[in-house]
Image (spheres, helix red, strand yellow):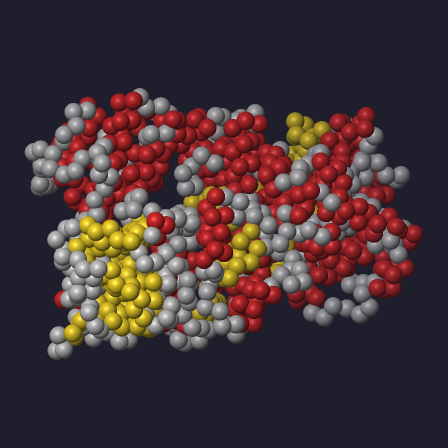
Amino acid sequence: VGALQWENVYVFISSTFNDMHAERDYLVKRVFPELSEWCEARKLHLVDIDLRWGVTEADSEKNKRVVEVCLDNIDRCRPFFLCFLGQRRGWIPGTKDISEETFLKFSKLVNYMGASVTEMEIIHALIDPMLNGSIEGLQEQERAFFFLRSPEYLKYVNNQTVRNIYTNEGEVDPEAADEALAHFKDGVVHKSGRPVFYYLALWDNEKSTPELAVAGMAADSDKQGITQGRLTDFTCDGAPLASSVLALLKQAIDERYPDRTDLTNQKVSPLQRELDQQDQFLQLAGEGFIPRTGDFNEISKYVHNDERRPFTLCAAPGLGKTSFLAHFIEELLARNTVMVVYRFVGVSDESWSLHRLLSSIIQELKAAGRIQAPLPVTAGEIKNKFSDLLENAGTNGKLVILIDALNQLDSGLDDLTWLPWLLPPNVKLIFSFKLGETKGDALLQKLERENKAVFELVRPFETPDDRSNLVTQYLSRYLKELDEDNIETIISSQGAANPLFLKVLLSELRVFGSHINLWDLIRFRFGQTPLSAFEAMLARIENDPAYSAVDPNVLVAHIFGWLTHSKNGLSAEELTDLLLKAKITDNRQAANDAVQLLLRQLRPYLARRDGRIDFFYESFYLAARKRYTSAHALAKTDTEWHRNLAEYFEGLSHEAPRYLSEIAYQYSHAGMTQELRSVLLDFRFVELRIHNMDVTAVIEDYNCALLAEAMMDKEDRTAMALIGSALSLASGTLMKDAAQLPTQLFGRLLGFDIPQIRCLLDNTIKYLQQEGRPWLRPLSPCMPSPGGALMRTYSPVANNIGVFRDRERMLVSNKTDGSVKLVEIKTGKIIRNYQLDAIPGGRYMNDFLLLEDENAFAVRLSGALVIIDIDTARTRTIPGFTGSPRRGLYPNLAKGNLLLCHDKTAAENAFRLHVVDTRAGEVIHTFTDGVQSTSVGFVFSADSSRLFIGTDDNRVSVYDAKNEFKLLYQLGMHPKYVTDICLLEDAGLLITKTADNRLCVWRMG
C-alpha cells in the first residue's frame, strides 16, 4: 500500500455547450463527487475537465485558440473521454476562427474543416489524431463512452428561441445540419468501436437554466423566456444516468489501474484506516497551497539542524497553515530521507481526541519497528510516557512528527502537558495552532516569553504576484484559465490576502457553468471574507438543480442547521434519520442519497470526528449558523434547532453513547427544562455517563443546566450546582473507582433538604434495588458537602505541595508510592505523574521543592539530589551528596537558581549544608562548620548577594554569596537555635524566631 503513489485521473467532457448545461452540471455535482471519493480510496485524484469557461476570452476572440485548447486538453486527459450529444450540431469554426499556430500544431486539422468543434474533438480523440504522426497504442488505451440524448423531451419545449438552443432549428439550413449530425452519429460515433448509450431527459417548465442568461444568448427582454425550463431526471436503461456513468468510469479506471483495485479489497487494521484517511486529506490540503520564495526556509532549517525544542507554526484563520504543512509534508515524503509521521487533527476518526491521536502515533512508530517496548494503553500512561517513547523511536534514525491544528482537539489548547519541550536526539516535533482566539494568542505569548519553542507565522498572500500565481496554478490543475481582467478583479479584492477566501472562490468558479459573466460573479457574489464566501457557496448549493429526491433548498438549510447546533458533529446516518423524522422525505434511501451527495460536494471543508461530520473551518461554521438562524427562508432560532436534535436523541436507546453525549447539552440549549431536570436527576444516566466518558463529562452536563438558555428556576439551579459540586468533590475517588458513585452522592448530599436532591437519592436507591446491587449506604452526611469552603478533595496521600505562580497547577508528593503528581487545581485532574521509584533511591523520597524559574522540581533521595524537568520528566543528578533523606535532610529553600540542602553522613556523624546551582547542576559551596543538626532558618537577600543562616551557636550568620560565601558578620545570641528568619530590607530590619517560640527584631549591619 505504502509503495503506491498518488496519480491524477483526468476525464475530458466533450459536448456542445449551451444545450448541455444541465448534463454538465449533473456530472460535475452529482457524478464526479462520488467518483472522486471512490478514486481516493485507490490513491487516485480525479480531475474532471469541463471547459465551459476554461478558454479565456482572449484565446476565444483575439488569439483564435478555442480549437487548440480543446484538442490539447483531450491529449492531456487520455485515455478517458466522455461525450454527450443531443439534437444540436454546435459551432462550426471557419478558417478565420483558427490561428495559424493551431494549424501548424495539428496538421491534419485542415482535413476536417466544416466539422463542428465537438466533431473535431471526437475525431481527434478516437478516429484520427490530428497531431503530426499518431498516438502510439491509441486504440488499446482509449476508454471513451458516448451518451446520446433521446429527442422525446422536445415535445414539451414550445418557446422557439429555446428550441433554437437545443436543436438545429435556428440554423440557416436546419435540414442540412440535422442530416450532418445524424450522419456523424451513424458514421463516426457508432463505428468508433466505443460503447454508445441512449438516455432520456424530462423537460421541466418550472425549473430554469440560468447559464443561458449569463451566456448572453438573447436580449435582456427575452432572457426570462430563454432561461425558463430545464432538462432533468436523466435516466439510462431505466436507471439514473449517474449509475451508468459511474459504473462505466469505475470499470474503466479499474482496468487502467489494476494494481489499485487491491487497495479496497484488503482488510485493513484500524491503524491503516487512520493512515489512509490522513493520506487522503494530505492530498486535498496540499492542493490548496502555492509555495512562495522562502516559505519553507525556517521549517526546513529546523528539520536538519540540532535544535532540541519543538517547532510551532501559527496563523490567523484562513491563512493556509494546514495547506502549508501539507505541502511541506509532501516534500519531506518525496525526499525519503527521514521517517515522517503526520496527523491533521479532526480529519480522521482517530485524530480528534488527544488520547486517540497520541495512541495512533505510537502505534505507527511501533508498527514501523521504531519502538520495541510494550505500548501504554490508558490516556494518562500515554501522555506520561510519550517523551520516553519518542526517545526510543529516535534511536533508530531521524524522526519528524508533524501535528496540525492542536486547537481542533477535543481538549483544545487546555491540555498540552504531553508535549516534550526538550526533544530527544534525532527527533523533531512540529505542531500548529490557530491564532485570533484568546487561548491561541496566550499560548503563543507564553512560548515566546519562555523560549520553549521555535516558532514561525504563516505569511498572508500580500503581493499581487503571489495572489495571481495562486489563482493561475489552482485553475491550471483543472486545465482552466481566466482572462487578465478577471484575475485582476480577484487578486485586488480585500479578501484575496486570505488563501481560504481564494480557495472557496476558485472552487466555486470551477463548477460555474458559463464564461461570459464571470466578472460579475467574481466581483459581487463572494464578498470580502471567508465567511461571506462560504455564505455564497451555501446559497449556490441551495439553488442548484435537485439531483436527489430532496429539494436542495430544504436539504441544505436543515443539514447545516442541525450540524451547527450539534455538540460534536453528526454522522451521515444521524442526518438521514433527522430528515425522516422531520418528514422532509419518507424514503430512507432517498434521504441517505441526498445527505451523501451534499457531503461529498463539501468534503474539503468538513472534518471527521469518530465517524461524525463537523466543520473543519470556523468561518464555515459561523456562515452556516448565521444563515440558518436568520437570513434563510427556512431559518429557525437556536432554540428550535436544539429542540429538533433533542427530540431526535431522546428517541435513541438511553444507553447509547450518542444519547449520553448529546442529550443534556441539547435539552439545556433548547430550554427543555423539565426534560433536562429529569435526566440530571436520574442516577442511571449519571452512572452511564461516567462509565462511557468520565466524571468531568457529567459535571459539564450539570454546568449546562446553569446556562440562561436552560431556563431553570432558582431552586433547580441551586440543586444542580450542588450536585455538580458534589461530583467535583468526589472526582478523585470516582476517577479511580466509578462504583463508589452512590456512596459518594449519599455521603455528600444527604444533609440537603431540597426536593431535587431527595429525588436523585431516591432514584438511586430504587435503581440499585432493582439491579440487586450491594453498596455501602451512608445513613447520615459523612463526607465534606458541596457549598462550603471545601471545593474538592485529593484522594491520594499528599505529603507536600508546591503551588505554581499561575495558581492553576500544583505539585503533590506521595511518599507512599514514591511519586510526585502535577495536578490541575480547578478540577483536581492529574496532568502528569512522575514515578520516582524508577530512579535509584527514589522509593525513599521524603520531600521535594518546586523550582518554578527552572520549570523543574528537586527531590532529595538517598545519597542524591535530583532535578526533574516538569515538561519532559528528564532527570539530572547533582553529584556530591552522600547522606540519607530519612534523617530529615531535604531541600529547604530556593532563590533564583540557588538551592540549599542539608546532607549528613552517618559514619562521620557530620552535618553539611550544600549550596547548589541548579542551572549549572553542581554544588558551588558547602558549609561544614556550625551547621545545626536540625532544620534551621535561612534566607537570601532580595538581590541574592547575602545569605542569612541560623547556626548552631544560636546566632544568625551572614555570608557574602557573591564572594565564595565568606562570613560578613553575625547577629547576637538567641536563647535557643533559630528556626525562621524574615528580612525587612526596606526598613533595614531582620526578624528571627527561635525554637522556644520567641521573636527577636534586629537592626541589620
Which residue is drawn at the image coordinates 29% and 65% (left, top)?
969
Which residue is drawn at the image coordinates 52% and 42% (left, top)?
618
Is 986 or 695 nearer to us in this picture? Answer: 986
Residue 162, picture quadrant: top right
Is 914 or 882 nearer to us in this picture? Answer: 914
**Residue 546: x and y, percent?**
59, 35
For residue 363, say whether it is visible. no
For residue 483, say whether it is visible. yes
Q: Would you say 974 lies left or right of 472 here?
A: left
Which residue is drawn at the image coordinates 14% and 51% (left, top)?
997
Q: Would you say 591 lies left or right of 296 here?
A: left
Residue 861, picture quadrant: bottom left
**Residue 911: x and y, percent?**
18, 71
Which residue is drawn at the image coordinates 25% and 66% (left, top)?
901
Residue 527, picture quadrant: top right
Is 671 or 654 nearer to us in this picture? Answer: 671
Residue extending furthest toward the right: 96
Q: How many labels does the image show?
A: 0
**Residue 239: x and y, percent?**
56, 42
The quarter of the rendered structure image containing the C terminus is: bottom left
**Residue 958: x and y, percent?**
29, 63
Instruction: Note whether 965 is above or below 852 in the view shown.
Output: below
